[in-house]
Amino acid sequence: MALKEPNLVTLKDVARYLSVSENNVRNLIRKNQIPYIVVGGIYRFDMDKVKNHFLKVEPNQEGVTNGE
């Protein structure tokens, strides 16, 4: 079975996808709140990992997940 190649995108692409500024994405990187890699000194993001990271269903303060 062949390995799936990652869908690597730029910081600008991630900012556009998340509808935030590039500086906001840099802040997420500094806080280690977004999955990324560095290729040749440039940030790259596996879009599938970014999507999965931000689509996680988190429980609210009462411990109930959205939609339940």
Image (cartoon, grey):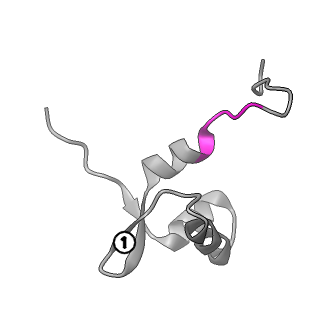
Q: Which residue is mark 1?
A: 38
Which residue type does callout 1 highlight?
Answer: Val
Q: Residue at x 45, y 48 (%)?
A: 49
Q: Residue at x 61, y 46 (%)?
A: 54
Q: Residue at x 85, y 34 (%)?
A: 61
Q: Is residue 10 magenta?
A: no
Residue occupying the far right of the picture: 62
Q: Is residue 58 depicted above or below 49 in this figure?
A: above
Rendering quarter of residue 65: top right
**Which span of residues is magenta-colored?**
54-59
**43 relative position to 16: left or right:** left
**57 relative position to 30: left or right:** right
Q: Residue at x 59, y 74 (%)?
A: 26
Residue occupying the far bottom of the picture: 41
Name the dominant secondary structure of the magenta segment: loop
Q: Is residue 58 magenta?
A: yes
